[in-house]
């Protein structure tokens, strides 16, 4: 961070937006500061600290789960609301992110704005149809899916909250991440969410991240599951389809071929876990 010359702590979102607009690409927003400490571009001369803004709550509102952008991952782990949501799938995911020290600093807004391809948060939140509210002179709410498609501009607005919409009854979700060590960056992650009605799946969302690309839905697997009962044969067919459908490539963490093996295992584990929870 040797290029940084100015550190600002605005007390309102309007002030923060004004500073970001005035300084353009030379300004960077700071939530927990994890990414800023590790990846600050050399052209950044101004840091805008958002910690004074009042976006630190976790609430249920008319069935929606609303998480403030300033909520840390540790605060999510300590929340009874998070623990109770969809069988604890959020808690399971967050507990696998980074180390306790980093979770103490990393914020929900930062986890989304950083758009790391290996992000566990983005993968699961895409599966849960997350809606992201941002301020850029005025409030605007868009789906996380559309935001990821235009992620080059995500750091030019201020994320204020993330909303997970109310779910139909008998909706289930599961998450699986593959790492070499407990605090390592994952080689692949997978999230599944679906509703079971009359023993058939509907509203299926299957998402993979760390392929090594950023999390994205795999429509072929979703289509194969919609309208089907989760029998062993259907699950095996979906797992095999996922292995061939993900955009797997080689990088320093894993080969594309190995990622396809992990994809097969990830879908199989997630769907069998959902079957078990549905039976309970």
Image (spheres, rainbow, N blue to C red):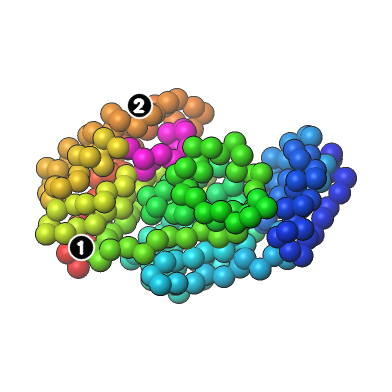
Q: How many marks?
A: 2
The residue singled out by tag 1 in the image is: 278
- Describe the element under mark 1 as helix, strand or loop: helix
Q: Quadrant of residue 274?
A: bottom left
Disc 1 or 2, which lies upstream in sequence?
A: 2
Q: Nearer the viewer, residue 212 or 198?
A: 198
Q: Is residue 229 above or below residue 211?
A: below
- Describe the element under mark 2 as helix, strand or loop: helix
Q: What segment carries the magenta color?
A: 207-218
- Give the class, few, some or many, for how many residues have Cα within 10 Å of label 1's Cα (few <14, many ≥20): some
x 69%, y 65%: residue: 53
The residue sitting at the right extreme is: 5
Answer left or right for 89 relative to 137: left
Answer left or right for 256 relative to 110: left
x 84%, y 39%: residue: 3
Q: Is residue 16 visible?
A: yes
Question: Where does the C terminus fall, quadrant-wise?
Answer: bottom left
The residue singled out by tag 2 in the image is: 257
Q: Is residue 132 above or below residue 257?
A: below
Indicate which disc residue 203 carries: none
Q: CA distance from mark 1 to mark 2?
A: 32 Å
């Amino acid at each position: 961070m040797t290029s940084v010359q100015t550190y600002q702590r605005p007390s309102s979102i309007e002030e923060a937006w004004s500073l970001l607009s005035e300084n353009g690409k030379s300004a960077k927003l700071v939530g927990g500061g994890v990414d800023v400490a590790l990846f600050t571009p050399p052209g950044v001369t101004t840091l805008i600290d958002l910690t004074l803004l009042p976006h630190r709550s976790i609430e249920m509102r008319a069935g929606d789960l609303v998480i403030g952008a300033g909520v840390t991952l540790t605060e999510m782990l300590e929340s009874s609301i998070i623990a109770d949501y969809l069988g604890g799938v959020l808690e399971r995911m967050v507990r696998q992110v980074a180390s306790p020290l980093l979770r103490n600093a990393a914020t929900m807004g930062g986890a989304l704005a950083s758009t790391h391809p290996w992000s566990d948060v983005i993968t699961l939140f895409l599966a849960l149809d997350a809606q992201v509210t941002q301020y850029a002179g005025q409030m605007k709410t868009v789906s996380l899916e559309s935001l990821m498609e235009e992620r080059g501009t995500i750091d030019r607005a201020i994320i204020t909250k993330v909303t997970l919409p109310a779910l139909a009854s008998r909706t289930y979700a599961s998450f699986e991440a593959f790492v070499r060590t407990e605090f390592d960056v994952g080689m692949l992650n997978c999230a599944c969410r679906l509703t079971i009605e009359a023993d058939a799946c509907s509203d299926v969302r299957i998402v993979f991240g760390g392929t090594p690309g950023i999390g994205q839905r795999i429509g072929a697997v979703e289509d194969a599951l919609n309208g089907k009962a989760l029998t062993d044969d259907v699950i095996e067919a979906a797992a095999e389809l996922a292995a061939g459908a993900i955009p797997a490539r080689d990088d320093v963490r894993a080969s594309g071929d190995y990622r396809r093996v992990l994809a097969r295992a990830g879908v199989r584990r997630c769907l069998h876990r959902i079957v078990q929870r549905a039976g309970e």
